[in-house]
Image (cartoon, grey):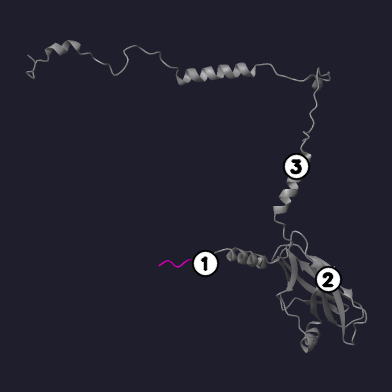
Amino acid sequence: PTRCGCPCRPYLNSLRYVYTCSPVPRKRGQSIHDETAEYMRIHLALSDGKKVSFADTTGGDLVDVKEFVAFDSDDEEDSARWEEEEAKYRKPEREPTYRVLPEFNAPVGSALLQAVHTNKLEVEQISPVEDEPLAFSGLIRVLNISFHKAVYIRSTMDNWATYFDHPADYVLESNDGDTDQFSFKLSFAPPYITHGSRIEFVVRYETSDGDFWANNSSMNYVVTLLLTYEDDSPQTNVNMQQMKSILRHPKNYR
């Protein structure tokens, strides 16, 4: 009888043991040393292989030469039609409008004459140049203290990392007895043509009695470049009105 007391002996003969692993011995894998040696053997075998070269590199003639040309499409007419149709819906690039803005107020009237007598020179006027949106012109009033005189504009567009001296031109028949006028023109240039670009300048007045400077009370004269674009809001409003016109009023449900 079994320990449990039940008649299960007839089933003992049908029991089998199932091993958790195979009792058949496996072939041992290669070690890291063996794999490294195999890799080096293959690498050396490949490095000792033959190299391929072409006959024309050694002055010989090639057996066969084939030339390849750019593919020409037979659908040039369809391509042109497609580009024309695409252009209808392509949004045109907006051209900016440039405007120069002086960041200082030039004195006028008696204030101008007082500044000229005190500093021997003063910037009198800044104006945009017609048909040159990136340029501006200026007038300088100087005290007539000597017959031989010259005026220079020292300007910078990169915060004085570099600067240039521009000679100003004498304005004919501008002498009023005590003062003379000189004119100049400056212009923004790439890469300094973006919104907010600045030109700073000071003025030097050379005479036989010495050199004199004007620098807007040590703040320098500054002109800023502004960029504006055409406003699309009117067209947008028209489109919104057209959209609203096709909408129906909501019904009142009771």
- In this orientation, which residue lies closer to the viewer: 248 or 154? 248
Q: In the picture provided, is 151 more to the left or to the right than 230?
A: right
**Residue wearing tag 2:** 130
Q: Secondary structure at mark 2?
A: loop
Q: Secondary structure at mark 1?
A: loop
State the predominant SS element of the stretch in magenta. Answer: loop
Callout 3 amino acid: Ser
Callout 2 amino acid: Glu
Residue found farthest to the bottom: 110
- Where is residue 210? Give x, y as percent: 84, 77
- Where is residue 81? Give x, y as percent: 76, 45
Q: Which of disc 1 and disc 3 is earlier in sequence? A: 3
Q: Which of disc 2 and disc 3 is earlier in sequence? A: 3
Q: Residues within 10 Å of mark 3 (few under 14, many from 20)?
A: few
Instruction: Name the quadrant containing residue 4.
Output: top left
Residue 221 visible here: no
Q: Which residues are magenta?
A: 250-254
Query: Is 229 within the magenta?
Result: no
- Where is residue 59? Give x, y as percent: 84, 20
**Residue wearing tag 3:** 79
Report the residue at 80% width, 31% height from top: 69
Residue 105 disc label = none
Callout 1 amino acid: His
**Residue wearing tag 1:** 249
Q: Is residue 66 above or below residue 99?
A: above
- Where is residue 38? Give x, y as percent: 53, 17
Instruction: Name the quadrant containing residue 183.
Output: bottom right
Instruction: Name the quadrant containing residue 211.
Output: bottom right
